[in-house]
Image (cartoon, helix red, strand yellow):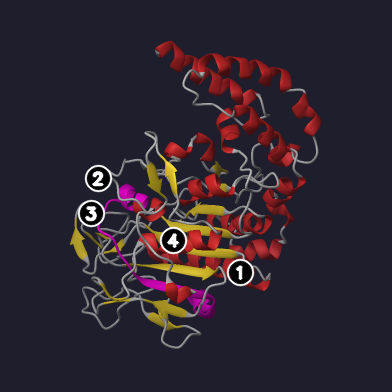
């Protein structure tokens, strides 16, 4: 067994030689579905890892006691009755193009496990307070990959600049993992050899077939359990992707005008949103932006703003004041861009994290600072496009923002709405490792107020 594992590891490493920089695991990500796309729709998610504070973004509670209400001031939007954070002036001008879901809630205040609930709709059987857990079920992008398939040389599930660390395709198979492309904000950005080879140098690929045939022979020897079954098909899809003019064009962010790239922001969030729009427009079903840090090398690494996380005494949300304008810039530009191009029925945008933050501020160690702790009992998500009804706030929390008092909704409801937009029946089931049927979602209904 040890020898077999070593051989398998060597095989995976050797595979990097086979497609000019795209590894065998990348090949495994690309696969066909004979049924093809059921709906020409896409979802762009900005996943706020760490859990953004609803009090400092979209549910400020200005009338609550001082230890609860937002540290920022509310501003009016172009939709009467909807106020948002003062650091979102661009969003305030386009509130008629998004909806706020202010009554999301669940019961797990752990980063990884909360993220698993938010992205898969499944509650982990065993919670891990160290936030190192991995999902036992696929997330919505893996499911979309399985159901919708590979089309026009484009992968069905793209993540940038990294994939959510807590989710994995599990029983759907390794080949449904996301196509991770890194940070698109650099001047020399390219997706492996895609930009060099796609639509231009397919002849070079044929010269590698001899090596791939030898790799196939090795694969057949070591794959006693069938774990790499279907590699031949995946390999052909890799050739398709690398020789596809559509894929080359979709990933070539340099085709965008400089002024539009400037509007999105010349940073990882801004350029990720721009590339996400290009990919969605081209037909990629799911693009998940791991909305962690907007600029490399900065300390404000995520949305986990509890005491001790890069704060100074009396300066709660110091780094939120830096983060929020970046989000306002890229998100408002993305929404406007989608609507101006007439893509608002095709593309759905979702901004959400694993939970919200505690109603009461806390002052404490390690550096005697203020902050808000984890709070899954009430938080907010933003939704735009998708042909849904915009310009509304759905649900509400009580005066202190402690729990929903109007139209309580769950992550499963939000995911059911995402699946509805993608044309996927969230009640269908897949077989797990033991041959048991597992429904895509154990519960949840499409949010009717959006329809």
In front: label 1 or label 3: 1
In front: label 1 or label 2: 1
Are dots 1 and 4 in contact, CB under 8 Å? no
Q: Which mark is residue 367?
A: 3
Disc 2 packing (10 Å; few <14; some 14–19; many ≥20): some
Q: Which x, y percent locates residue 249? A: 73, 50
In front: label 2 or label 3: 2
Are dots 2 and 3 in contact, CB under 8 Å? no
Asked if the magenta segment contains residue 351, the reply would be no
Q: Nearer the viewer, residue 113 or 86?
A: 113
Mark 1 vs 2, N-terminal side? 2
- Dot 4 lies on which element? helix
Residue range in magenta is 87-116
Are dots 1 and 3 in contact, CB under 8 Å? no
Q: Which residue is mark 1?
A: 345
Q: Which x, y percent locates residue 419? A: 49, 59
Disc 1 to disc 2, C-alpha distance? 38 Å
Disc 4 packing (10 Å; few <14; some 14–19; many ≥20): many
Q: Which x, y percent locates residue 415? A: 43, 59
In front: label 4 or label 2: 4
In front: label 4 or label 3: 4
- x 40%, y 13%: residue: 2
In front: label 1 or label 4: 4
Disc 1 to disc 3, C-alpha distance? 48 Å
Is 433 placed above or below 93 here? Answer: above
Mark 2 vs 3, N-terminal side? 2
Visible residue check, residue 181: yes
- x 23%, y 54%: residue: 367
């Amino acid at each position: 067994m040890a020898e077999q594992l070593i051989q398998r590891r060597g095989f995976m490493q050797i595979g990097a030689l086979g497609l000019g920089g795209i590894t065998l695991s990348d090949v495994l990500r690309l696969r066909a579905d004979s049924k093809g796309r059921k709906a020409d729709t896409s979802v762009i998610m900005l996943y706020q890892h760490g859990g953004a504070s609803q009090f400092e973004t979209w549910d400020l509670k200005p009338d609550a006691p001082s230890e609860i209400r937002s540290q920022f001031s509310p501003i009016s939007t172009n939709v009467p009755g909807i106020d948002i954070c003062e650091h979102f002036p661009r969003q305030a001008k386009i509130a008629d193009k998004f909806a706020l879901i202010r009554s999301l809630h669940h019961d797990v205040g752990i980063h990884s496990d909360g993220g698993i609930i938010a992205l898969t709709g499944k509650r982990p059987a065993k919670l891990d307070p160290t936030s190192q857990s991995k999902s036992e079920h696929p997330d919505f992008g893996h499911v979309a990959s399985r159901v919708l398939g590979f089309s026009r040389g484009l992968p069905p599930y793209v993540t940038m600049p990294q994939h959510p660390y807590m989710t994995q395709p599990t029983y759907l198979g390794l080949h449904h993992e996301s196509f991770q492309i890194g940070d698109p904000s650099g001047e020399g950005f390219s997706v492996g050899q895609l930009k060099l080879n796609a639509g231009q140098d397919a002849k070079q690929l044929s010269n590698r077939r001899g090596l791939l045939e030898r790799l196939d022979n090795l694969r057949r020897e070591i794959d006693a359990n069938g774990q790499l079954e279907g590699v031949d098909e995946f390999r052909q899809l890799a050739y398709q992707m690398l020789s596809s003019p559509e894929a080359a064009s979709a990933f070539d962010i340099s085709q965008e005008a400089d002024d539009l790239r400037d509007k999105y922001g010349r940073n990882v969030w801004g350029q990720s949103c721009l590339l996400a729009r290009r990919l969605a427009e081209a037909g990629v079903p799911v693009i998940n932006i791991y909305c962690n840090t907007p600029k490399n090398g900065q300390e404000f690494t995520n949305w986990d703003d509890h005491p001790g996380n890069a704060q100074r005494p009396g300066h709660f949300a110091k780094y939120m004041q830096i983060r929020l304008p970046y989000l306002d810039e890229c998100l408002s530009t993305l929404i406007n861009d989608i609507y101006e191009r007439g893509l608002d029925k095709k593309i759905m945008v979702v901004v959400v994290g694993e939970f919200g933050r505690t109603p009461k501020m806390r002052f404490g160690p390690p550096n005697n600072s203020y902050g808000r702790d984890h709070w899954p009992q009430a938080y907010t998500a933003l939704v735009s496009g998708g042909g849904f009804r915009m310009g509304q706030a759905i649900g509400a929390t009580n005066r202190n923002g402690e729990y929903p008092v109007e139209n309580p909704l769950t992550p499963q409801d939000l995911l059911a709405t995402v699946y509805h937009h993608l044309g996927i029946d969230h009640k269908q089931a897949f077989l797990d490792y033991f041959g048991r049927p597992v429904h895509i979602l154990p519960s949840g209904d499409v949010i009717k107020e959006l329809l």
